[in-house]
């Protein structure tokens, strides 16, 4: 029997909408600081996260939380765990590029079972619950019907590291073009990239270095939309993974043959 996590999903959606309102309101005035890894953090990240945490605590005071911008660390296999990215795509946000989102996932004993990703610019709420499909603004979504890598639009992302990971990514992009794919896109928001795979805007996505909060909700949304996710080596994706390869599932093996971590090494 599939367990219902309706309350958790509704809280995630409500918290994401509250955070979305905050980040839009603060975009013109938010202060920006730089972390040690070339990434940015804004006042909006902090305020949005505080709001999300407060909303979760209101309904689930005993649950554990992993969140990007505060010291709320918990173990990934906690029995009840919330995984929060209060503003995915902060660099876009700081530079006034309208492509960023809020990502909130809920996991039971290490398994993500509910998740919401909200794009406040487009007012698009992506959501999923284990075994119950994926949705965009409450309308069911599914991955694309593209049958081959050669027909695909592939999205990717770069970790803030400017060394080996960047070189591996660039090398894989070159190999993808050698496969005559339709194109590459790099939009700068992992959670939204995954949701766009889920609704068929992208056919596949890969990134070699991510944090749990970057992909937890998006992973479930892709899988519930009929797609397939593995880690950057082709193994089962879980909350301890540090990279992701996602596709509409129809050409995943061929995709991995090009972009897996081992094959992504520089020649």
Image (spheres, helix red, strand yellow):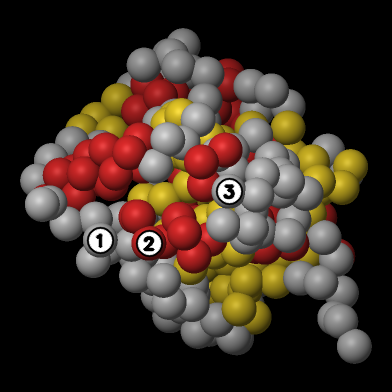
Q: Is residue 181 above or below residue 30?
A: below
- Snapshot quadrant of residue 75: bottom left
Q: Residues under labels 3 and 2: Cα distance? A: 13 Å
For the N terminus, the image quarter is: bottom right
Q: Residues under labels 3 and 1: Cα distance? A: 19 Å
- Per the image, label 1 sits on a secondary structure element best described as loop
Residue 92 picture location, percent across and down? 40, 24
Residue indicated by mark 1 = 263
Q: Residue at x 79, y 41 (%)?
A: 136
Residue indicated by mark 3 = 148
Tag 2 or tag 3, which sits nearer the N-term? Answer: 3
Please state which of residues 194 and 99 is positioned toward the viewer in this rendering.
194
Please state which of residues 48 and 104 is positioned toward the viewer in this rendering.
104
Residue 249 picture location, percent across and down? 62, 60
Residue 91 picture location, percent across and down? 35, 28
Please state which of residues 149 and 21 is positioned toward the viewer in this rendering.
149
Q: Residues under labels 2 and 1: Cα distance? A: 7 Å
Q: Is residue 121 above or below residue 229?
A: above
Q: Is residue 204 above or below residue 132?
A: above
Q: Which mark is residue 257?
A: 2
Tag 1 or tag 2, which sits nearer the N-term? Answer: 2
- Marks 2/1 in contact by CB < 8 Å: the verdict is yes
- Per the image, label 3 sits on a secondary structure element best described as loop
Residue 236 picture location, percent across and down? 49, 77
Q: Residue at x 18, y 36 (%)?
A: 38
């Amino acid at each position: 029997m599939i367990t219902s996590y309706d309350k958790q999903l509704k809280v995630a959606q409500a918290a994401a909408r509250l955070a979305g309102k905050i980040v839009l309101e603060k975009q013109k005035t938010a202060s920006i600081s730089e972390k040690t890894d070339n990434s940015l953090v804004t006042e909006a990240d902090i305020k949005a996260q505080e709001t999300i945490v407060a909303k979760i605590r209101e309904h689930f005071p005993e649950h554990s939380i992993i969140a990007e911008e505060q010291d709320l660390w918990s173990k990934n296999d906690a029995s009840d765990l919330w995984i929060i990215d209060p503003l995915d795509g902060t660099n876009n946000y700081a530079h006034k590029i309208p492509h960023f989102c809020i990502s909130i996932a809920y996991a039971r004993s290490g398994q993500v079972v509910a998740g919401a990703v909200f794009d406040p610019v487009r007012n698009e709420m992506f959501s999923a619950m284990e075994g119950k499909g994926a949705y965009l603004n409450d309308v069911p979504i599914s991955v694309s019907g593209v049958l081959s890598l050669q027909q695909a639009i592939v999205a990717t992302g770069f970790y803030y590291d400017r060394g080996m990971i960047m070189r591996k990514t660039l090398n894989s992009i070159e190999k993808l073009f050698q496969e005559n794919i339709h194109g590459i896109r790099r939009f700068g928001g992992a959670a939204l990239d995954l949701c766009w795979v889920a609704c068929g805007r992208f056919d596949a996505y890969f990134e070699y270095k991510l944090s749990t909060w970057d992909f937890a909700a998006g992973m479930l949304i892709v899988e519930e939309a009929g797609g397939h996710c593995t880690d950057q080596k082709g193994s089962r994706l879980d909350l301890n993974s540090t990279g992701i390869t996602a596709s509409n599932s129809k050409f995943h093996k061929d995709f991995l043959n090009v972009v897996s971590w081992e094959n992504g090494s520089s020649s």
